[in-house]
Amino acid sequence: MKIGIDIDDTMADTFDYLMPYIAEFFDVDIKYLKDNNISYSNLPKKMKERELEFAKKYYDKVIASTPFKPKVAEYIDKIKELGHEIIVITARDKTLYNDEYKTTIEELKNNNIHYDKLICDFDKANVCKNENIDLFIDDSIANCNRVNELGIETILFNSKSNIKDKTNLDRIDSWEEIYEKIKN
């Protein structure tokens, strides 16, 4: 099986890792970000307007150091041992990074993530279609819905950006659960 997997807030807790940088750049308190459950999907308008400026200032410098969720590397290795191919599909491009591939490869290496292919592209549904993905894992309801509309099975990884949203998508909380679902 070919499995497409997102990085940010699926493999890594990226937004939480970026909070100190976000607080500094936007001159807000981290407590404000946490208390208001701020994430990519609900940035306040004034922050959203400067999001690209923030990305260009920080992403290439700090994203490679983002720690991944517990046991992600272990379970991805177990999935690969079952004979499955891992395609990392992330919405990263030149609008956000100076070199999205270099930064992402370094991040994956730093977290011992073994994969077969990396694709940086915002149109994840098109990537899944072109790569003949059998299963797609992401924390974005919109991405999962678009991929699901193509007849591709999806798993929504629960994150703070989607946990309060209603959806009929199959939700999972941990990489152990993902592994068990794929194994069975």
Image: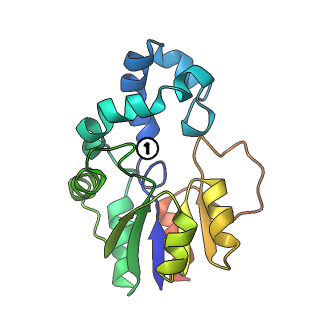
The percent position of residue 151, horizontal first and vertical second, equals 68, 80
The percent position of residue 32, horizontal first and vertical second, equals 55, 16
Viewer-proximal residue among 127 and 134: 127
Describe residue 167's horizontal placement relative to residue 10 as left or right: right
- The residue wearing badge 1 is 13
Please tell me which residue is depicted at 43% across the width and 44% down the height of the picture. Answer: 13
Quarter of the image holding residue 58? top left
Q: Is residue 133 visible?
A: no
Residue 90 to residue 33: above or below: below
Residue 61 to residue 7: above or below: above
Outermost residue, front side: 95
Q: For numbered disc 1, what is the local secondary structure?
A: loop
Please tell me which residue is depicted at 37% across the width and 17% down the height of the picture. Answer: 24
The colour scheme applied to this rendered structure is rainbow
Please tell me which residue is depicted at 66% across the width and 55% down the height of the picture. Answer: 141
Quarter of the image holding residue 105? bottom left
Describe residue 3's horizontal placement relative to residue 56 as left or right: right
Q: Is residue 74 visible?
A: yes
Quadrant of the frame with the C terminus:
bottom right
Describe residue 19's horizontal placement relative to residue 63 as left or right: right
Q: Residues within 10 Å of mark 1 (few under 14, many from 20)?
A: some
The percent position of residue 144, horizontal first and vertical second, equals 63, 63
